[in-house]
Image (cartoon, rainbow, N blue to C red):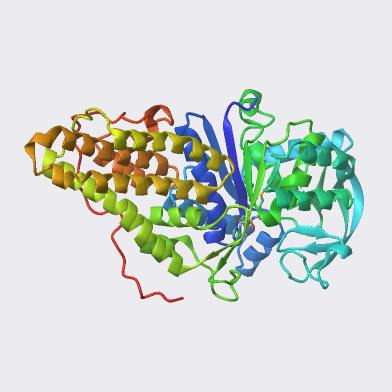
């Protein structure tokens, strides 16, 4: 079971187009997916859209459109944004697709038959923005505790999922498997939430119709979260292709934002237990991003769309910044000043200059051809050892996942290669013909340093890694494997390198003072 490395993002509501917050989860998942592919794993990386529910129905109604037409239009923005950000998802699921509705109906039918779904009546609060049923005791000054918006009083006949029956088992699973819900602070919140008592979960609605009809009672549509969580198994053919399902399930990682952890760490495991399915290996909740110190909101007019940043800095600088600046498990603040600083210092200067000066020297002194490595001296041995150690460190940091620390370590290596070039001073060696073999060795190892850097940054900055790889005369970076292709000295000699435009042209500073 579960031979495939399976990673998911939440599926996004189509009531809005993506912003840097929604793109954050998707980007993080992409980095892990790309890294695992380079490690030789077969990866299934899933993202998609959550298209049912009251919130989407209302957004469509405001525009006098049918919810389906609205969803069809909105989904193109997600696809476009993920293309722009170079996201390598293997599939894109929409909850209005037939393959999904069929599985959702099959699943709920199964639970109805086993007695875990029953008809009752719900009376209580509902937050449309968060699509969440709330108890009076959960409200914050009468409003939704999560988003602060006013809540609606709902009184309906509903089907319920017997979640209370699974409370102890879910709690035990979380406590026995510390890696299941992360980070730890969030796990503690989930544990106290379960300990405070779980009631059965309302899982259908009758007061509107934009949802999946219950097969045994079509007056009801499925509660949007019950429907949405099932995307993780409908996309891998639960109920129709058992072989595929079993190779892929359970998911290795569900990446989610902190506000939706409860759905993934409580309701979802209970649903899976009720269906007799294994639980995902890990649910990781990341923090929220603010913009220049403020919560992003349409009313404040400070919502930042990925294209604004990509247009200015390019896709890889975007990806680098979001993965380097923030610690994944906690909240972070996006600021235009820090992106500009990091761009100039770390991308244009540290990485860009290294690449251009090494390739320039190889062209100037060796006609662009990769020279012989010769016998490694002290400096080369140290560099090779650092590189080998880095392979293990990056593996560990990405398992955490601590993207920012992984990049900080990779940059230590970029600095080390820069220092290697400085202390070896190939420009001085070039002045003396009797030192030709030394010059070959230094140029070879500098190029090898660049090759290693390209591999390390590939999951984070795929386009830049491809460019560096190509400029080194190498065929296809995505067929490389870590660690096999990352052993020091794997760069073939005699290959033709190319000099080309700067990877990250420097930008003027001082214009931004926010
Ligand atoms: N549709 C549900 C998820 C169902 S999964 C079975 C949903 N969608 S969402 O569009 O509202 O948000 C999805 C993701 O975007 C969440 O992981 C959320 O944390 C993330 N973000 C939305 N705004 C964010 C920030 N400002 N910062 C970081 N991530 C944020 O919830």
Q: Is residue 76 visible?
A: no
As rendered, which of 272 and 58 lies closer to the eye?
272
Give coordinates of residue 2: x percent, y percent: 63, 28
Q: Is 105 left or right of 423, judged from the image as shown? A: right
Q: Is residue 465 left or right of residue 398?
A: left
Query: In the figure, residue 421 lies in which quadrant?
Result: top left
* Of 166 and 178, the residue lying toward us: 178
- Ligand 1 falls in quadrant: bottom right
| Quadrant in the picture for residue 102 | top right
Left or right of 267: which side holds 50?
left
Image point 33% across, 42% down: which residue? 466
Q: Residue farthest to the front?
A: 378
Q: Splitting the image into 4 quarters, where does residue 112 fall?
A: top right
Quarter of the figure that contains the N terminus: top right
- The answer to whether residue 247 is above or below residue 235 is above
Q: Residue at x 12, y 35 (%)?
A: 436
Q: Which residue is located at x 17 percent, y 38 percent?
A: 439
Image x and y of residue 376, in percent: 27, 30
From the viewer's perspective, tell me whether residue 107 is left or right of residue 363.
right
Name, please, the residue furthest toward the right.
120
Pick the residue in front: 464 or 342. Answer: 342
User: How many labels were placed on the picture?
Assistant: 0
Indicate the position of residue 453 as horizontal and vertical percent values.
Answer: 36, 42
Which x, y percent locates residue 95?
64, 47
Residue 152 visible? The answer is yes
- Residue under the image location 74 percent in, 70 percent down: 149
């Amino acid at each position: 079971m579960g031979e495939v490395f399976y990673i998911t993002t939440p599926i996004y509501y189509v009531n809005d187009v993506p912003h840097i917050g929604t793109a954050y989860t998707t980007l993080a998942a992409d980095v892990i997916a790309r890294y695992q592919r380079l490690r030789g794993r077969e990866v299934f990386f899933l993202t998609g859209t959550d298209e049912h529910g009251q919130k989407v129905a209302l957004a469509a109604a405001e525009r006098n459109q049918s919810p389906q037409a609205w969803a069809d239009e909105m989904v193109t923005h997600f696809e476009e944004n993920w293309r722009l950000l170079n996201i390598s998802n293997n599939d894109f699921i929409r909850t209005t697709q037939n393959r999904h509705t069929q599985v959702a109906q099959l699943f709920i039918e199964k639970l109805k038959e086993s007695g875990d779904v029953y008809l009752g009546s719900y009376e209580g609060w509902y937050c449309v923005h968060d699509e969440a049923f709330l108890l009076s005791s959960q409200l914050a000054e009468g409003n939704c505790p999560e988003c602060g918006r006013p809540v609606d009083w709902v009184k309906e006949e509903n089907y319920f999922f017997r979640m209370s029956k699974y409370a102890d088992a879910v709690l035990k699973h979380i406590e026995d498997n510390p890696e299941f819900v992360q980070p730890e602070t969030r796990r503690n919140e989930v544990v106290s939430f379960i300990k405070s008592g779980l009631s059965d979960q309302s899982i259908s609605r009758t007061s509107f119709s934009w949802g999946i009809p219950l097969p045994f009672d079509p007056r009801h549509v499925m509660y949007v979260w019950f429907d949405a969580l099932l995307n993780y198994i409908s996309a891998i053919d639960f109920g129709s292709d058992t072989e595929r399902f079993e190779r892929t399930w359970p998911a290795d990682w569900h990446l989610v934002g902190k506000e939706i952890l409860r759905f993934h760490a409580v309701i979802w495991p209970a649903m899976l237990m009720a269906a007799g399915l294994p639980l995902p290996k890990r649910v990781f909740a990341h923090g929220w991003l603010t913009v220049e110190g403020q919560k992003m909101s349409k009313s404040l007019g400070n919502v930042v769309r990925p294209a604004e940043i990509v247009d200015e800095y390019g896709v890889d600088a975007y990806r680098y910044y979001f993965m380097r600046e923030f610690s994944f498990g906690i909240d972070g603040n996006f600021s235009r000043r820090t992106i500009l600083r990091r761009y100039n210092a770390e991308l244009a200067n540290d990485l860009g200059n290294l690449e251009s000066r090494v390739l320039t020297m190889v062209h100037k002194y060796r006609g662009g051809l990769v020279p012989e490595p010769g016998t490694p001296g002290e400096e080369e041995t140290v560099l090779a050892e650092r590189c080998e150690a880095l392979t293990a460190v990056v593996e560990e940091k990405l398992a955490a996942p601590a993207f920012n620390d992984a990049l900080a370590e990779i940059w230590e290596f970029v600095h080390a290669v820069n220092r290697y070039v400085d202390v070896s001073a190939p420009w001085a060696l070039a002045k003396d013909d009797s030192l030709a073999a030394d010059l070959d060795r230094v140029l070879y190892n500098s190029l090898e340093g660049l090759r290693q850097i390209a591999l390390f940054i590939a999951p984070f900055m795929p386009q830049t890694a491809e460019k560096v790889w190509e400029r080194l005369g190498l065929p296809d970076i995505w067929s490389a494997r870590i660690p096999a292709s990352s052993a020091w000295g794997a760069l073939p000699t005699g290959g033709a390198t190319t000099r080309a435009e700067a990877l990250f042209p420097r930008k003027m500073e001082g214009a931004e003072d926010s």
